[in-house]
Image (tube, rainbow, N blue to C red):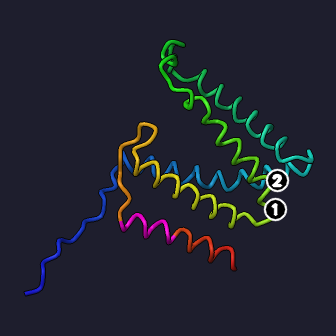
């Protein structure tokens, strides 16, 4: 008698998961727009670092306005117990923006984005596997590893075209 396999049902997509997923989809598209606009700034200013600085300055003003218009007003004391590395998150984004402004005209936008996604997947798998930085621990398993390999295959296919 053949072994009985339980069919896996797809994850339920309700509004509480659909809205964040759609927002991330939009944000991903905006990341793709950010690189070529920063390339324009880098060419005009002669520096990908200046382009990143302009980009982050505009972003800082936008976030400041959104925060001022919002309702959240934490006290300074709420930041006291944070570890030192909680303060350097912006450094990661600034590094990416500067590198993207440098790399996009050299390797192409699609290659830049797919390599960036491969790096994100690799880091995300590592962080999940170890439950690092306060994330829940989600061990790497075969389907997740295959997914990561498929992303790398995607990078190769995009680069070769």
Task: Relative to 75, say whether 52 is above or below.
Answer: below
* 4, above or below 61, in the image: below
Task: Say left or right for 39 vs 30.
Answer: right
Q: Tell me the element at label 1.
A: helix
Q: Residues within 10 Å of mark 2 (few under 14, many from 20)?
A: many
User: Where is the C terminus found, in terms of image quarters?
Assistant: bottom right
Q: Nearer the viewer, residue 111 or 126?
A: 126
Labelled disc at residue 9: none
Asked whether 97 falls inside the magenta stretch, the response is no
N-term-proximal mark, 2 vs 1: 2
On residue 39, the disc is 2
Relative image position of residue 146 (x, y in whole percent): 43, 70
Q: Is residue 41 left or right of residue 110?
A: right
Q: Please provide percent x and percent y for residue 128.
A: 42, 49
Q: Which residues make up the magenta segment? A: 142-150
Compare residues 45 and 73 and report the one nearer the observer: 45
Vertical order, 123 against 143 (above or below) = above
Left or right: 138, with 121 as reference point: left
Q: Residue furthest left?
A: 1
Label 1: how many Cα within 10 Å (few below 14, some 14–19, many 20+)? some
Q: Main secondary structure of the magenta part?
A: helix
Q: Residue at x 52, y 50 (%)?
A: 24
Task: Report x, y in % for residue 126.
Answer: 47, 52
Q: Image point 71% across, 50% down: which residue?
A: 34
Q: Quadrant of the N terminus?
A: bottom left
Whole-angstrom CA distance, mark 2 to mark 1, is 7 Å
Residue 109, percent across and down?
72, 63
Say which residue label 1 marks.
105
Q: What residue is at 86 percent from the left and 49 percent from the top? A: 42
């Amino acid at each position: 008698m053949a072994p009985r396999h339980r069919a896996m049902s797809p994850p339920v997509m309700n509004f509480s998961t659909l809205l964040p997923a759609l927002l991330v989809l939009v944000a991903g598209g905006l990341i793709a727009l950010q690189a070529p606009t920063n390339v324009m700034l880098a060419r005009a200013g002669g520096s990908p670092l200046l382009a990143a600085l302009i980009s982050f300055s505009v972003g800082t003003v936008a976030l400041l306005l959104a925060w001022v218009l919002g309702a959240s007003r934490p006290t300074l004391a709420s930041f006291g117990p944070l570890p030192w590395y909680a303060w350097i998150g912006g450094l990661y984004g600034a590094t990416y923006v500067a590198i993207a402004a440098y790399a996009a005209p050299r390797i192409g936008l699609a290659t830049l984005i797919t390599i960036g996604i491969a790096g994100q997947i690799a880091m995300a798998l590592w962080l999940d596997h170890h439950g690092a930085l306060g994330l829940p621990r989600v061990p790497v398993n075969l389907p997740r590893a295959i997914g990561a390999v498929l992303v790398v295959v995607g990078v190769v296919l995009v680069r070769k075209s």
